[in-house]
Image (cartoon, coloured by chain):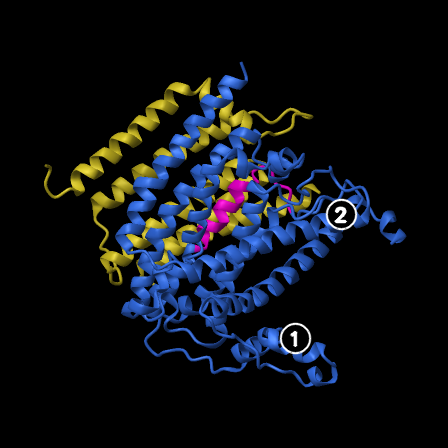
């Protein structure tokens, strides 16, 4: 490790960044795989079924007790799923628009992964010069919204490229839905930043790290509710999964896709869920801070503790995403639009106004 | 590393020009969707230029508003109207004249801006951050800012009025 100290700061920065990007990527991908498993297990429990409990790799039988237990929990299921996605036939229908048909799955995944870059997933690992965030931008939240808003292209282009009715309807619905809820989402966050006074996500976490009562979820509960609902709409999850509603649109925008291209849409959805959860943890649940407070980590152990704390909070929110999906029925499309435009946007605007008045009062 | 920044500038500027050209005169495809997508790429390349100028806020807003919202609506409308491949349009004298006039006018403004621009004094840090921008907007440029918002409001009311079939 000592040899790193002799490199010049730029090289050090580049090296650390590459390591952070790689680790964040691997962690997110693992989370995606296991979020799918959790989804299947939770849905099974809610519907009084057992869920995946059969996938058994060859080495499982050599592990006494643990092996069968892991198999019953479905721990090996994601590997089987991944293999299946890779090995299935990748079928391209003859009537599709080829270029967009190939581009769309990639355009869905990339923005979801890029949003992770500005999220502070830990304090430091002992060295204050090397914070645990890939890109410490001054306009962190705007970057996130910008990238998230690009995510809609994947779905729109998938609908357009498929050149058939149901995917097209899915794409159109998705466009209108995502644009509508982006406004509510952006406005709900304005109130948070008015309280903090900075657009940098690191500063948002610093504001909340004192203890649990400083968390934004208690200071801006309305903003949190609006953000949460908008996040469901932005990630196309139930109760707002109209772009892919199976019962009316077959599979929506990914009807014509198979094999790895379909898997990319799947991956994009879960990566977007993870990004939304991470964003909510950062904005409303104190980021990496422990509930009982404590400042930035000075040692390696405490630093890792902060990262684990962040991941734990994120995991809880992910389970909420999954839980809601299997508990609520789907909205009708006009209800969805009415909820977004005539409930949440006025509410978010009122929240900004109230926060501004409150801030003006306490600053007197 | 000034050389590296210069290189990035030329890369982004070149890409912006290339994508812009492909947006209006794509030799391979006359599809309106393709044109719209190249316009998105042009906007993203411009955002890259803003970042090189340390104007992070402008870059983020450029992507958020233009690439993320305006162009998505463009695509939405193109898809809803189901536009077919554009026919190759015949150039008329009037079209060419109007186009040339617009180009000359915009070029004039640009050249004037370049001549009027002062080279940045050494030691002054370029600030394109949110706070100074907001302060300027709400003090020095308050009137133009409010006039712009009023203009947008008028446009919005007009659209609603036009799109309502009958007014109760």
Q: Chain ID for label 2?
A: A
Q: Which of B150 and B140 is in front in this view?
A: B150
> Would you place residue A202 above or below residue A237 in this image?
above
> Would you place residue A248 above or below residue A312 in this image?
below
Viewport quadrant of the N terminus of chain B: top right
Q: How far apart are marks 1 and 2 (CA)?
A: 30 Å
Determine crowd level at label 2: few under 14, some 14-19, many 20+ residues with C-alpha closer than 10 A: many
Q: Position of residue A5 (x, y in %)?
A: 86, 48
Image colour for chain B is yellow
- Residue, far top: A364
In the visual, does A250 lie left or right of B130?
A: left
Q: Which of marks 1 and 2 is in front?
A: 1
For label 2, the SS is helix
Q: Give the range drawn in magenta.
A: A135-151
The numbered mark at residue A70 is 1
Query: Earlier along the polypeptide chain: callout 1 or callout 2?
Result: 1
- The blue-tinted chain is A
Determine crowd level at label 1: few under 14, some 14-19, many 20+ residues with C-alpha closer than 10 A: some
Are callouts 1 and 2 both on one chain? yes
Residue drawn 64% across the image and 53% down it = A311
Residue drawn 44% across the image and 64% down it = A104
Q: Nearer the viewer, residue B111 or A114?
A: A114
């Amino acid at each position: 490790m000592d040899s790193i100290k002799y490199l010049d700061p730029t090289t050090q920065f580049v090296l650390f960044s590459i390591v952070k990007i790689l680790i964040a990527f691997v962690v997110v991908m693992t989370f995606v795989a296991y979020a799918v498993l959790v989804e299947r297990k939770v849905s099974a429990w809610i519907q009084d079924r057992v869920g995946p409990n059969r996938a058994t790799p060859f080495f499982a039988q050599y592990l006494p007790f643990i092996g069968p237990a892991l198999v019953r929990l479905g721990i090996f299921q994601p590997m089987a799923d991944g293999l299946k996605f890779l090995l299935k036939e990748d079928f391209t229908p003859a009537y599709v628009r080829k270029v967009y048909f190939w581009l769309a799955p990639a355009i869905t995944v990339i923005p979801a992964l890029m949003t992770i870059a500005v999220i502070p997933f830990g304090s430091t690992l002992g060295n204050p010069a090397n914070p645990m965030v890939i890109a410490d931008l001054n306009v962190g939240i705007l970057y996130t919204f910008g990238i998230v808003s690009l995510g809609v292209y994947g779905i729109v282009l998938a609908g357009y490229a498929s050149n058939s009715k149901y995917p097209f309807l899915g794409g159109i619905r998705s466009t209108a839905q995502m644009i509508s809820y982006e406004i509510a989402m952006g406005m709900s966050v304005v109130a948070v930043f008015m309280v903090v006074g900075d657009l940098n996500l690191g500063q948002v976490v610093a504001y909340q790290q004192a203890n649990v009562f400083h968390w934004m979820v208690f200071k801006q509960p309305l903003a949190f509710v609006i953000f949460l609902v908008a996040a469901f709409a932005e990630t196309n999850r139930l109760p707002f999964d109209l772009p892919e509603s199976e019962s009316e649109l077959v599979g929506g925008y990914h009807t014509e896709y198979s094999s790895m291209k379909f898997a990319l849409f799947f991956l994009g959805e879960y990566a977007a869920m993870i990004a939304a959860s991470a964003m909510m943890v950062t904005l409303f649940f104190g980021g990496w801070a422990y509930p009982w407070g404590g400042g930035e980590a000075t040692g390696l152990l405490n630093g890792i503790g902060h990262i684990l704390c962040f991941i734990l909070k994120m995991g809880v929110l992910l389970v909420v995403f999954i839980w809601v999906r299997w508990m609520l029925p789907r909205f009708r499309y006009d209800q969805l639009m009415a909820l977004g435009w005539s409930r949440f946007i006025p509410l978010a605007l009122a929240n900004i106004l109230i926060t501004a008045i409150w801030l003006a009062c306490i600053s007197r | 590393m000034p050389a590296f920044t210069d290189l990035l500038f030329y890369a982004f500027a070149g890409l912006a020009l290339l994508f812009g050209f492909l947006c209006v005169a794509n030799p391979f495809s006359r599809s309106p969707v393709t044109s719209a997508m190249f316009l998105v790429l042009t906007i993203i390349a411009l955002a890259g230029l803003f970042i090189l100028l340390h104007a992070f806020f402008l870059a983020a807003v450029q992507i958020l508003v233009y690439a993320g919202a305006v162009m998505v609506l463009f695509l939405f409308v193109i898809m809803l109207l189901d536009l077919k491949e554009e026919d190759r349009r015949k150039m008329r004298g009037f079209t060419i004249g109007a186009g040339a006039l617009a180009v000359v006018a915009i070029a004039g403004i640009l050249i004037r801006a370049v001549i009027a621009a002062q080279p940045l004094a050494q030691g002054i840090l370029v600030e394109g951050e949110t706070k100074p921008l907001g302060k300027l907007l709400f003090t020095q440029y308050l009137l133009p800012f409010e006039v712009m918002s009023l203009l947008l409001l008028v446009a919005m009311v007009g659209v609603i009025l036009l799109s309502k079939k009958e007014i109760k």
